[in-house]
């Protein structure tokens, strides 16, 4: 029996063989797992509770309600289906004003050497 951690399997599934950062977006949490040299850097894994797919659906519905007459809070399931059908992770980094706003929201990067935190 061979064991391979889920973050490494995700990298392999996307054509990355050893190094990368895996982001698992659940309903109510996001887990970020860096991998170096074919190993998961467990001490660098970060979990953000309260942020996930359900929050994205709620924010999307708030925007739709504010901008569109006839859209109301009873359309949560419709909004979720719309999100799942048409939304995806940006294939390239955001540029310009959107990219600058995003950078302001992100924590300061941490350099990881040899699979361990400083």
Image (cartoon, rainbow, N blue to C red):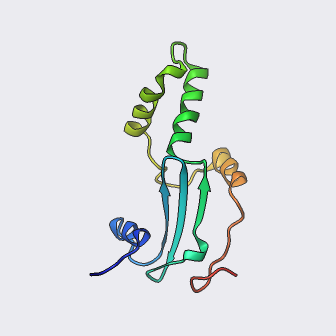
> In this orientation, which residue lies closer to the viewer: 6 or 101?
6
Residue at the front extreme?
1
Q: Quadrant of the C terminus?
A: bottom right
Name the residue nearer the viewer: 22 or 4. 4
Q: Is residue 1 above or below residue 72?
A: below
Q: Is residue 27 left or right of residue 103?
A: left
x, y (%) of residue 102? 66, 50
Say which residue appears at 55% left-offset and 52% top-offset: 29
Question: How many numbered dots are placed on residues in this image?
Answer: 0
Question: What residue is shown at x 42% (from left), y 78% (from top)?
Answer: 18
Q: Quadrant of the N terminus?
A: bottom left
> Which residue is drawn at the image coordinates 49% and 46% (left, top)?
27
Rendered image quadrant of residue 9: bottom left
Residue 100, percent from left and from top = 69, 50
- Name the residue located 72 percent from the left edge and 64 percent from the top edge: 108
- Is 53 placed above or below 47 here? above
Q: Residue furthest top?
A: 70
């Amino acid at each position: 029996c061979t064991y391979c951690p889920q973050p490494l399997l995700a990298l392999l599934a996307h054509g990355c063989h050893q190094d990368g950062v895996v982001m698992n977006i659940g309903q109510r949490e996001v887990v970020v797992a860096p991998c170096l040299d074919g190993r998961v850097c467990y001490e660098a894994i970060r979990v953000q509770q309260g942020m996930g797919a359900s929050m994205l659906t709620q924010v999307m519905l708030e925007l739709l309600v504010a901008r569109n007459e006839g859209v109301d809070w009873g359309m949560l399931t419709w909004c979720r289906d719309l999100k799942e059908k048409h939304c995806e992770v940006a294939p390239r980094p955001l540029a310009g004003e959107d990219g600058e706003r995003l950078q302001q929201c992100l924590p300061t990067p941490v350099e990881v050497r040899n699979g361990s935190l400083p």
